[in-house]
Amino acid sequence: MAKTYNPSSFQASLPEQQKIWVQSVHKNINGNLDLGTPTGQQAHDASVNAGVFTKFDKGNGSGILVRVAANGLANTGAAYNWPSSGSLTINHGLGRQPIGFHVVDNDKTVNVFRTAAPTATHITVQPTDPTASVTLYIF
């Protein structure tokens, strides 16, 4: 990601309120944005998901991270598991209809797609392979 131009070189020519705003934007864009903070992870075992983060606190972005474990996989600490077939409804808690989601981690090749229109409280998704574990960023 590109860095912003440091406002310290021209801040003397800015009104005080604008200077504060420009400094805030510069600070946030240059390393102070986070999508979420990990708060739990799967045990360090011999599996492909050993040590993978499974629980998250909301960051200062406008979305949430959610771990969905593979169907039949137990004791992962993930908030959800894929059903053996069909869709999974996730309570996202954004308080608004999400724009969409990204798969930010997966343990095997898998696509995840929406199966219903999202609402202010839920998004319904389905994987092409329910034996895959994924982390979704819903925004």
Image (spheres, rainbow, N blue to C red):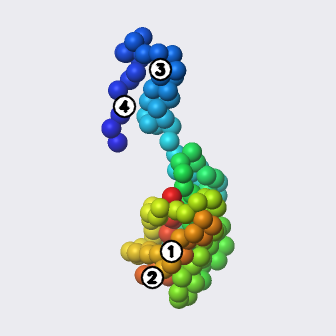
Which element carries disc 1, helix, strand or loop?
A: loop
User: Which class describes the residues within 10 Å of circle 2: few (<14), some (14-19), or many (20+)?
Assistant: some
Tell me, for residue 4, which label it has, or none: 4
Q: Nearer the viewer, residue 70 or 15?
A: 15
For the residues carrying marks 4 and 1, which lies nearer the camera in this image?
A: 1
- Which residue corresponds to the image point at 38% horizontal and 23% vertical from the top-left? 6
Which element carries disc 4, helix, strand or loop?
A: loop
For the residues carrying marks 4 and 2, which lies nearer the camera in this image?
A: 4
Earlier in the chain: of badge 4 and badge 3, it is: 4
The amino acid type found where label 2 is placed reads Asp
Tell me, for residue 129, which label it has, or none: 2
Residue 68 in the image: above or below residue 72: above
Residue hosting label 1: 117
Residue hosting label 3: 19
Res 97 quadrant in image: bottom right
Which element carries disc 3, helix, strand or loop?
A: helix
The image shows residue 22 at horizontal and vertical percentages of 45, 26
The image shows residue 90 at horizontal and vertical percentages of 60, 71
The amino acid type found where label 3 is placed reads Lys
Residue 99 in the image: above or below residue 73: above
The Cα–Cα distance between marks 2 and 1, rounded to whole angstroms, is: 21 Å
Res 66 quadrant in image: bottom right
Earlier in the chain: of badge 2 and badge 3, it is: 3
The Cα–Cα distance between marks 2 and 3, rounded to whole angstroms, is: 51 Å
Earlier in the chain: of badge 4 and badge 1, it is: 4
